[in-house]
Structures are given as C-alpha cells and as structure tokens.
Image (cartoon, helix red, strand yellow):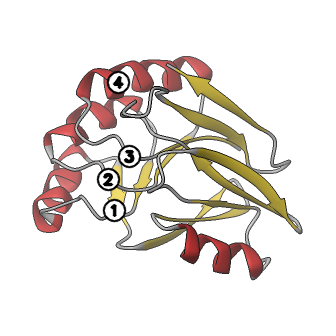
Amino acid sequence: MLIAVMSDSHDHILKMKEAAARIRGEGAEMVIHCGDIVAPFMLFELSKVSVPVHAVFGNNDGDHFLLMKVAAEVGNITFHGLFGKVDAGGDPVAFTHYREAADGLAGKQEYNVVCYGHTHAHHAEKIGKTLLINPGELMGMQGKSGFCLVETKTGEFREIVL
C-alpha cells in the first residue's frame, strides 16, 4: 500500500494545504502523521487528503482533548496517543513521535515500516526487514519542507520536497 508519512507540521497551514493536494495527486491510500500538528484548526486542512489519517501526539501538541474532538468531527482522522500501529493493506506499520521509541519498535522486527518525527530531519534506514523512517518536517523551519511516500510492501520510499 502506498502511504504518505509526515511529521512536525507546527501549524504551517499553507504547507499542509500543499501537502494534502500533493498526497491526493500521488494516490496515497493512507496518511501517517508522526506528531506536532499543534492546533486543532490544522485538522480541517489535513482531512482534505480524503483518505484515512492516523496520528500520534508530539511534544508540542497542546490540547489533546480538543484535537481528538475535532478529529472526530472531520471523520477521517484517528489519534492513537503516543504510539500507533495500523494494518496498511496487510502490512504492519507502527509510528511514534520519538526516535528512541521508534528504534525499539524497529528492533522488534514485527513491522514492515516504523515511522517517527521530532528531529525535523529526514532519515531512513533498514533495520533487518523494517524500514525506519523520519519524513522530516512539513513546517520547513530548517529550510526543507516535505513528507515521504512509502510503499509498505517493499519499503521503497520517495522524499517529497514542497
């Protein structure tokens, strides 16, 4: 399954709008957000990807209750707390905000893909059969804004720079 993986959007609504349009155009069937969406208003734009979105909380996501309330209103966004796992077309995918937790998940060798954020820097490596990937930041604070497209069956990915 082709999924989009993003993180650290930090209320940058224009980049979210651009990413949502690109994700629709690329035909991703699911979106994973690895935390730091920040404000609930961002969920209205994120929901426009028109596919299921699975998210975890990051260290800058303030009002968890309101984020979950708005996610329920838009309908296609699910928050999983600090750690999430989903079935992506038969392929197990796990996601969290922090690298340390992601390393532990990848080391278990139970997932085809493990995603994380927080560092704002793109990173990808194979640990055994598992692709460990940080899509970088959507926000663009460090100069490069984007996300990744990942094929969960093969572990192949593309970094999309906006």
> Which callout, 1 or 2, points at the residue further toward the start of the chain?
2
Question: For this rendering, which residue is in front, 84 or 72?
Answer: 84
Q: CA distance from mark 4 to mark 1?
A: 18 Å
**The disc labelled 4 sits on which kind of residue?**
Lys
Label for residue 36?
2
Q: Quadrant of residue 35?
A: bottom left
Q: Dot 4 corresponds to which residue?
A: 15
Type of the residue with mark 2? Asp
Does residue 119 sit above or below 46 in this rendering?
below
Q: Element type at marker 2?
A: loop
Left or right of 64? Residue 160 is right
**Residue with the mark numbered 1:** 58
Q: How many marks?
A: 4
Q: Quadrant of the N terminus?
A: top right
Q: Is residue 82 above or below residue 4?
A: below
Q: Determine whether, in the image, residue 6 is placed left or right of residue 45.
A: right
Q: Dot 1, crowdedness within 10 Å: few (<14), some or many (≥20)?
A: many
Q: Are marks 2 and 3 in contact (CB under 8 Å)?
A: yes
Which of 72 and 127 lies nearest the eye of the viewer? 127
Q: Amino acid at mark 1?
A: Gly
Label 1, label 2: how far apart the Cα atoms are:
5 Å
- Whether the residues at callouts 1 and 3 have beta carbons within 8 Å, the answer is yes
Mark identifier at residue 115: none
Q: Determine the CA span between mark 4 and mark 2.
A: 14 Å
**Label 1's element?**
loop
Secondary structure type for disc 4: helix
Return the residue at label 3. 8
Residue 113: image location, x then y, percent: 71, 59
Give the residue type at disc 3. Answer: Asp
Q: Position of residue 137 (x, y in %)?
A: 45, 39
